[in-house]
Amino acid sequence: MSACNQQGQKEKCCSDSYWDALLDSEFLTGKQLMKYLMWTNRTSCQLSHDIGGKMLRNPSGIDGQLAVCIDPQVAPKPEDCLVYSFGINDDWSFEEQMEKYGCKVFAFDSTMKVKQHDHTPGIHFYDWGLGDRDEISNNLTYHSLSTIYEKLGHVNKTIDYLKIDTEGSEWRILRHMLEVGVLSQVRQLGIEIHLDGGKSIDQFRLSAKLLRSLESTGMVRFDAKHNPWYKGNFERLKLTGPYGIEIAWYNSKLLHNNMSSAL
């Protein structure tokens, strides 16, 4: 049994100071690192729903869902919520469910070879990718989150849910967003992080510390799920594990003043 699961030690194990000390330790192991990446404090959100996804086999399960916290202080308010979703890959299940929930959804993907259009009356699609700068690369257009806020007239608005699934570029994008402080406008954040099985423990340590930097800004982790269809060997960590992990946070600095239920 791990220390996090031992009776009476959960607080000590999984506190901010515990993770910071662990990631700074010169004796950090691959198993400990993976434990941090897949850890979540489920008591931080009393009710969360998995939104979207599609059923897969071998193993059977749902892929592509995003955890959304429905607790009154952070839940998107139906008919008054804004969703940004980066990385569609022709699976509109999350976006369509969030539209049915009552949100206005802006969806982005530069790789689908589809131009700007309204997928439905409440889902507006743009053929832009999310980047850490504004650029055109291989005939694909990328914008920073700040630029997209400006282009869509959302500079002073709160993004109730920001989904990021950018197939590996999320690390540099996240670093940029933390540097410019743009996540202060995001109430809930869901990211699929992608892990390279060939990296060293020190390279993984830097990635984990980037997530800790996110959490030190007030983002509270409430869900983490590994991708069982996307796993393999981490040779330099001497373990087998997932190459993809879906993690969700809410912003403790953007709580609703009205504590009544959003549903």
Image (cartoon, grey):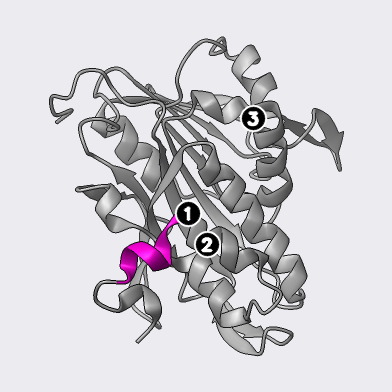
**Which of the numbered marks, if any, corresponds to residue 16?**
1
| Number of numbered labels in the structure image | 3
Q: Pinpoint residue 202: horizontal percent, then vertical percent.
A: 76, 70
Between 14 and 118, the one lying in front of the other is 14
**Which of the numbered marks, if any, corresponds to residue 223?**
none
Q: Pinpoint residue 184: horizontal percent, then vertical percent.
A: 53, 26
Task: Assess whether mark 3 and mark 1 are in contact (beta carbons under 8 angstroms).
Answer: no
**Which of the numbered marks, if any, corresponds to residue 19?**
2
Q: Earlier in the sequence, mark 1 or mark 3?
A: 1
**Amino acid type, residue under disc 3 in the picture:** Lys
Count neighbours of disc 1 (C-alpha within 10 A) and say few if under 14, some if 14 to 19, many if 20 or more.
some
Task: Assess whether mark 2 and mark 1 are in contact (beta carbons under 8 angstroms).
Answer: yes
Horizontal placement of 175 versus 218: left or right?
right
Magenta run includes residue 14: yes
Question: In terms of secondary structure, where does tag 2 sit?
Answer: helix
Segment colored magenta: 9-16
Between 163 and 109, the one lying in front of the other is 163
**Amino acid type, residue under disc 2 in the picture:** Trp
